[in-house]
Image: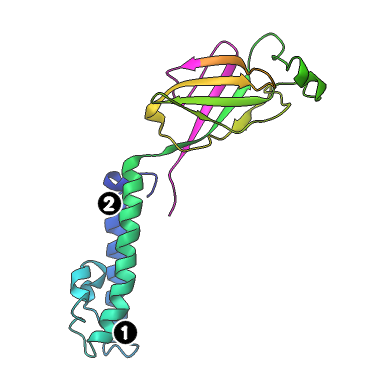
Amino acid sequence: MRHKGVVSGYSDIRLRFDACRSAALKFHRKYPHNEYGMLDCSLDGCGDIGSCFDGGDAPGGGNKSTIVIILPGGLLILLLIIAGFNWFQGPHVSAIDIRYIGAQQEAQDKGIARLTGSARPDYQVIFVVSGREITSNTLNNRSAKNWLSLQPQSRFELEGLEQIKIINKQVLKDEILDVIDKPGRKGSSEHYEYRLSEERAVY
């Protein structure tokens, strides 16, 4: 359901609550006198939280049943509010995979960096999001002949992504290996192929 969002997932939510109500009805028929004290709330407990606040109509209702129902109900409402806010925000970019597709050899570190034994690029990606730069982690002395996965240091939505810079981090000055303007979820440039992964936060 978290992949559908609040609006498109509404039918799934209704089905879940209908199943809850059906289970409550079966339980009430099996234990009509509420011998376990867990159904003091009326049978609308799964579909109408407001009916739980007065202890319900079943025998034994009162303050005890109100406490039992209100605490879980309040926690559930809080979690739904937090999750709903995240759904409306939309998914966030969680990673980028890059692969070198150029015909020439990958750019190598130069100068002082060569002395450290880093003969292959130290890959990093810079995301330009709404005018600000968000860097990824760095993969040292790696080849992108096969897919490399890097993660942004902070969350952002794909809709705000304006540019992707693939760089080779060096001791003196970083080398820009490729620049991708107006990127989508996946694509390619002259030298690199890329694909973005998105996910929603789970509470």
Amino acid carrying label 1: it is: Lys
Q: Report the residue at 56% width, 31% height from top.
A: 136
Q: Is residue 40 above or below residue 110?
A: below
Q: Is residue 176 above or below residue 63?
A: above
Q: CA distance from mark 1 to mark 2?
A: 29 Å
In-image side of 92 versus 15 (left or right): right
Q: Is residue 191 one of those drawn in magenta?
A: yes
Q: Could you tell which of marks 1 and 2 lies nearer the N-terminus?
A: 2
Residue 190 point in image, percent of width and height:
57, 10
Q: Report the residue at 24% width, 72% height from top.
A: 45
Helix, strand or loop status at disc 1:
helix
Residue 49 point in image, percent of width and height:
22, 69
Q: Report the residue at 20% width, 68% height from top.
A: 48
Residue 141 point in image, percent of width and height:
74, 26
Task: In the rendered structure, find residue 11 and report the number of the disc placed on it.
Answer: 2
In this orientation, which residue lies closer to the viewer: 61 or 16? 61
Reading the image, the residue beneath label 1 is 30
Amino acid carrying label 2: it is: Ser
Number of dots carrying numbers: 2
In-image side of 115 versus 174 (left or right): right
Q: Is residue 56 one of those drawn in magenta?
A: no
Corner quadrant of residue 91: top left
Q: Is residue 142 above or below residue 88?
A: above
Corner quadrant of residue 194: top right
Q: Report the residue at 32% width, 73% height from top.
A: 71
Residue 17 point in image, percent of width and height:
29, 63
Corner quadrant of residue 53: bottom left
Report the mark closest to the observer, 1 or 2: 2
In magenta, the rendered stretch is 180-203
Helix, strand or loop status at disc 2:
helix
